[in-house]
Image: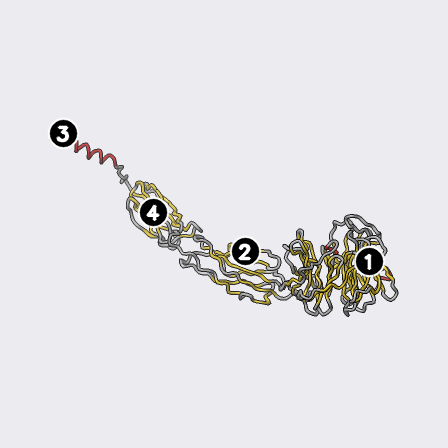
Amino acid sequence: MKIRLKILACFFLLISCSEEPLDVTGTGSIKGRVVDVRGYKGIENARVSSNPTTSTVYTDKDGYFTIDKVTAGKYAFQAQKDGFITRFVPATIEKDIETEVIFELEVSTATNKPPEVPTLTAPADNAEGQAQSLNLTWTATDPEGDPLTYTVTVKNGTTDEVKTYSDLKTTTLNIKDLSFSTKYYWQVTVDDGINKPVNSVTNSFRTLAFPNPRYMYVKKVNSNNVIYTADDAGNELQLSSAQVNSFRPRKNLSINRIAYISSDGSLYQIFSMKPDGTDVKKITNFVPIAGFNMDNVSYAWSTNGKQLIYPNFDKLYRIEADGSGLVQLFKTPNGKFISECEWSRDGSQIILKVNDVSGYNVEIYAINMSGNVLYTVLSGVTGAASGIDISVDNKKVVYTRDASGFENSNYRQLDSRIYIYTVATNTSAELASNKENGFNDLDVKFSPNEAKVIFVNTSNDGLSAKNIQTVSLSDTSSGTSSRTTLFQNASMPDWK
């Protein structure tokens, strides 16, 4: 019996020795703060308690708390709040010492709901005539009232340029410097910092029409030709996508549409569009536009806009503007390629520029609608020629040719000048336009009132930028005419 009592005594002694008693020699205090880890904003009314148990307190409106008269010892304090993951922080309380702690609570995603789908409020979907500077507005809500941030994506429907406006805190975004006559697409993404971001639907709007677009031309964007329009003040608008090679724009005022050449697979076809770049329609199909060096190939509208004429190597075709009624009008008698054509305003004659497969042995002549040659503007010369136009009264033809007569495999021109042919006298005269040596004048056209010509000027090195210039016809005989540069780094001008 004594032995059993001794064993029990030792057992209780071992138990008492296995627990480290709290130091009850005094008290201290603990203070701290409970914050939302997302923005370190204090969390109000969070519950703070401990193990071993002391007092249980709740945080104030800024997330602060204090527990006084805590018996000295080691504790595990915890902070908890609905919607957040409970956080434990160890702390040692010492006599007469104030201990500080901070709880960084993460939001619990187990029951948190994502924001509602944002509603785009202005401008209305498919709205027309919007200003170049406007406010995009939307509404969004969150079931738990979580703080929300927004990302707005805006895409230019012509250029495919995408702009992203991130980390927005309000439901209004002012965007500026929008292009005229352009359709834009926009979408809002809302993020509560907890769930997967939520996207709105995509809406669109179109800006105001481009004012008085009298000029058209092309610019190189990367490796593609891109069509632009511009007004007299130099304001310009991109009409075609930089992802497609589109060039040689020609506007018809009667139907207010622009025709142009664009790549279509391995071929080139003629398309048309509205002046703002919309409503694109394919005109040619089975017989594409083709010839020597597509940069020097052109086509022409009829004055009423119902038909177009265009070349396919040694043949000239006429086609209705809707793509129907394809007819072969002419075939060169010597197999030369038709590179350029212009249709007189009265529809009675067509000016053709033809050349061999190398671009040389140029001839420029006029034919009537039966294919009979009316007169010859240019023949029997060496060197290249480019750009032809006929005056409204059919009395003059303007063109350019390389006066140096130089020919090589790269089709380089050394001294291309502007000439005007007078039908009545069957003579050509150079336009005294003060062209600088070492430069070429190319791709010439009459201005709408025929008081000037518009053309491309560039260095003959074949590498320098191309500029679109004009010169008056009224003072060229004196040789004192001055040139005006309208557009830089541009070519293939059209002026209506």
First reached walking from the N terminus: tag 2 or tag 3: 3
Residue highlighted by disc 3 = 3
Q: Which residue is denoted by mark 4 in the rendering?
A: 78
10 Å crowding of disc 2: few (<14), some (14-19), many (20+): few
- Which image quarter: residue 7? top left
Q: Is residue 127 left or right of residue 94?
A: right
Q: What residue type is disc 4 on?
A: Gln
Answer with mark 4 or mark 2, whichever residue precedes in sequence: 4
Q: Amino acid at mark 3?
A: Ile
- Relative to 19, is 202 above or below? below
What mark, if any, has residue 363 been given in the picture? 1
| Residue at screen point 40% across, 58% down | 144
Is 401 or 71 nearer to us in this picture? Answer: 401
Q: Quadrant of residue 320?
A: bottom right
Mark 2 or mark 1: name the one nearer the start of the chain: 2
Q: Residues within 10 Å of mark 4 (few under 14, many from 20)?
A: some
- The residue tagged with tag 3: helix, strand or loop? helix
Of the residues tagged 3 and 4, which is closer to the observer? 3
Q: Position of residue 170 (x, y in %)?
A: 50, 59
Q: CA distance from mark 3 to mark 4?
A: 47 Å
Residue at x-position 27% and y-position 37%: 20
Instruction: Give the label on residue 165, or none.
Output: 2
Is there any visible trace of residue 284 in the rendered image? yes
x 22%, y 36%: residue: 16
Residue 382 drawn above or below residue 282: above
Q: In this rendered view, identify the residue nearer to me: 335 or 201.
A: 335
What amino acid type is highlighted by mark number 1?
Glu
Q: Residues within 10 Å of mark 1 (few under 14, many from 20)?
A: some
What is the secondary structure assignment of the residue under circle 4? strand
Mark 2 secondary-structure assignment: strand
The numbered mark, 3 or 4, whose residue comes first in the sequence reads 3
